[in-house]
Amino acid sequence: MSRPSQVVDPIVAALQASRTVCVAGHVRPDGDCVGSQLGLALALRQAGKRVTVWNQDPLPDKLAFLDRARLWAEPRPGRRFDCVVAADVATYERLGTVGDCVRRRRVLVNIDHHASNAGYGDLNWLEAQAASTGEMIFHLLERAGWPVTPPIADCLFTAVSTDTGSFQYPTTRPWTFAVAGELVGRGADLGTICQEVYQSCSLPRLRLLRHVLNRIRLHAQQRVAYVWLRPADYLRTGASPADTEGLIDYLRALEPVVVAIVFEELEPALTRISLRSKRPSVNVSALASPFGGGGHPAAAGARVRGRPRTVQRRLLAAVRQAIESLPPDHASDRPV
């Protein structure tokens, strides 16, 4: 992965010149977001900065082990920062309520690996070739000369591992393994990370998974699998929205499914859609774009206002059209 000095060096300079820094992440934070935020925040604190870590949503329970320093805090309006870093945030709107809380700032730094990121910061480092934002944060720390301690290595390894599907996704490049190896060498505790992230599951999440598996629907000659999640489902199972992380992969794993979709009713007229594609010829980021969303070719999402049935009908029609327009030999595409 290229690390152009003309992009990275001004960011390093801005951070070094700042006394107060807020590291912000996107709504419904995943492993890459949390690991990138906390890894960078720990490095900044070691460098003598006053650091705040803000996210609209709570820290997911399964990632709480990364925040031993208890840096994660609830956003508060009115604070002023020398620098705000948006880590793994594809659009400013994805900051959610944090966006309004960080408007009093000198500089906004945008560090992200989503191809759909249009560059909303004062300083932007956008690296679509990177498998994760955590990978980029590692290179940033190296460039700044800031030590990568074992706690930082835990955060960044979690970021890299989760956003590559444990190094299974085709976004994983040779340099991704090189970064992961460096992080292990700096003290990343693989046993703890694997236990906390991959080998533990709460009973409410298990109940939610059972609900999802019982309600999968197939469409377009079984090439699309989708399911709905509604507020009552969380009440019934005792789960939280954070427990939905990774559930879509069960739909994606079905054969002959090409696209998996999770519709989640956030409000009566607001639906969160998550999409995953198994074929490079079906770009779900492009499918999410007309709905105001984006992401990666193989993983994307959006929040859509409108009647739930209307949202479902529109999206299924768009996905079906994309699948039906595939060339006859699309079955030979290598899965993504």
Image (tube, rainbow, N blue to C red):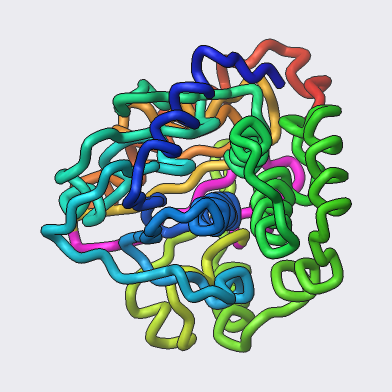
The answer to whether residue 71 is left or right of residue 185 is left
- 13 and 248: which one is in front? 13
Reply yes or no: does residue 143 show up in magenta.
no
Q: Which residues are magenta?
A: 247-268
Quadrant where the C terminus sits is top right
Q: Residue at x 37, y 33 (%)?
A: 109
* Image: 314 above or below 304: above
Q: Place residue 66 in its image quadrant.
A: bottom right
Q: Place residue 292 in its image quadrant.
A: top left
- 197 and 254: which one is in front? 197
- Percent coordinates x, y for residue 218 in the rendering: 58, 50
Reply yes or no: does residue 249 show up in magenta.
yes
* Image: 210 above or below 131: below
Q: Residue at x 63, y 30 (%)?
A: 143
Q: Residue at x 48, y 42 (%)?
A: 88
Q: Is residue 286 visible?
A: no
- 28 and 177: which one is in front? 177
* Image: 241 above or below 246: below
The answer to whether residue 65 is left or right of residue 150 is left
- Percent coordinates x, y for residue 16 in the rendering: 44, 38
* Image: 273 above or below 192: above
Labels in figure, total: 0
Q: Residue at x 56, y 38 (%)?
A: 299
- Percent coordinates x, y for residue 107 in the rendering: 27, 33
Quadrant where the N terminus sits is top right
User: Residue reaching furthest left?
Assistant: 78
Q: Is residue 82 visible?
A: yes
- Percent coordinates x, y for residue 190 in the rendering: 84, 64
